[in-house]
Amino acid sequence: MDTRDHQPLLKVEALTVEFPTRHGTLTAVDGISFHIDAGEVLGIVGESGAGKSLTGAAVIGLLDPPGRIAGGRVFLEGQRIDNLAYESMRRIRGAKIGMVFQDPLTSLNPLYTIGQQLVETIRTHTSLGPAAARKRAIELLHEVGIAAPAQRIDDYPHRFSGGMRQRVVIALALCANPRLVIADEPTTALDVSIQAQIIGVLKRMCRDHGAAIMLITHDMGVIAETADRVAVIYAGRIIEIGPVAGIIGNPRHPYTSGLMHCIPRIGDARERLAQIDGAMPRLTEQLPGCSFHPRCPRALACCRTEQVGLIAAGQSRVACWLYAPNGNG
């Protein structure tokens, strides 16, 4: 329930991201709104192409052209940041917002040791001198679980495994003690045991630093282990948002329910997992009504013609006519 009397750390209001093309303007993120409190992990989950990563890129000011924010507002600790000049946003991105990407090799320069990269980042965003910055870098490597950090700090990225490189990237994201960390599919390329370790690092980071985390993933298992709340995105819109236990245990939207039935469970006697028939509409397809209705087994007549906003359903909010108070459901 949204009964806070304090200001959320991150607040996104009606965010819209568009891509102009020769054949018209494509809307990739369509009026998304959410907040994240300090010390909270908000999971953003959905299929590939749903708009998860674009939402994160818009928040951090890293949309690739010709993508642009066409509407809405983004606030960090009460300050509006979506309309800042490039250099102002760059300073905030280093000092107050950290980013963890799916592939750590895109964040690490192979020509420099990890120590050089950590020290440079620390000195850019703090007043520490070279010796103090190196000491801080070693502390960060220890914090994210790098064994013998005083020796490993002078190694190059190629000397680390994929899981260790991801830990280094998390250390880079923590260099300036950011208030917000956006983690975009941080465990996708890792095996299950390493995924669990990285999840543990993210949870400790949230607990020990009081940082808010926006965790972008397609994996409901990662969300269940890590997030406090979850926002389910489909075709550029949030279709369900609420506490993670409630949404996993009692999903309201037919799409969320379909996602949960696709996940295998220990002791499950089913021979085959359920699947969601069909595919998410392309950006070029402007469907009337709810964008999920062609795939929805519970679609009503109004679902094919009218969109519906988020409706309170228990502790969650869901964009589904089945929960409309006017009797459509």
Image: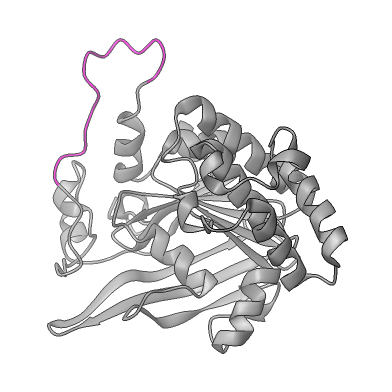
Apparent side of residue 118 relative to residue 289 in the rendered image (left or right): right
Between 287 and 161, the one nearer to me in the picture:
161
Between 314 and 9, the one nearer to me in the picture:
9
The prevailing secondary structure element of the residues shown in magenta is loop
Residue 25: x %, y % from top left: 22, 82
Between 127 and 186, the one nearer to me in the picture:
127
Task: Residue at 26%, 14% (x, y): give it.
Answer: 270
Task: Residue at 13%, 45% (x, y): give it.
Answer: 278
Q: Can residue 278 be seen from the camera position used here?
A: yes
Q: Tell me where residue 65 sits by quadrant.
A: bottom left
Between 82 and 150, the one nearer to me in the picture:
150
Residue 272 covered by magenta stretch: yes
- Total label count? 0
Task: Residue at 17%, 66% (x, y): give it.
Answer: 305
Where is 283 relative to 172, above or below? below
Residue 146: x %, y % from top left: 68, 37
Q: Which stretch is magenta?
A: 265-278
Q: What's the coloring here?
A: one colour
Residue 147 covered by magenta stretch: no
Where is 146 relative to 269, above or below? below
Residue 98: x %, y % from top left: 62, 62
Where is 214 relative to 256, above or below? below
Apparent side of residue 48 relative to residue 219 in the rendered image (left or right): left
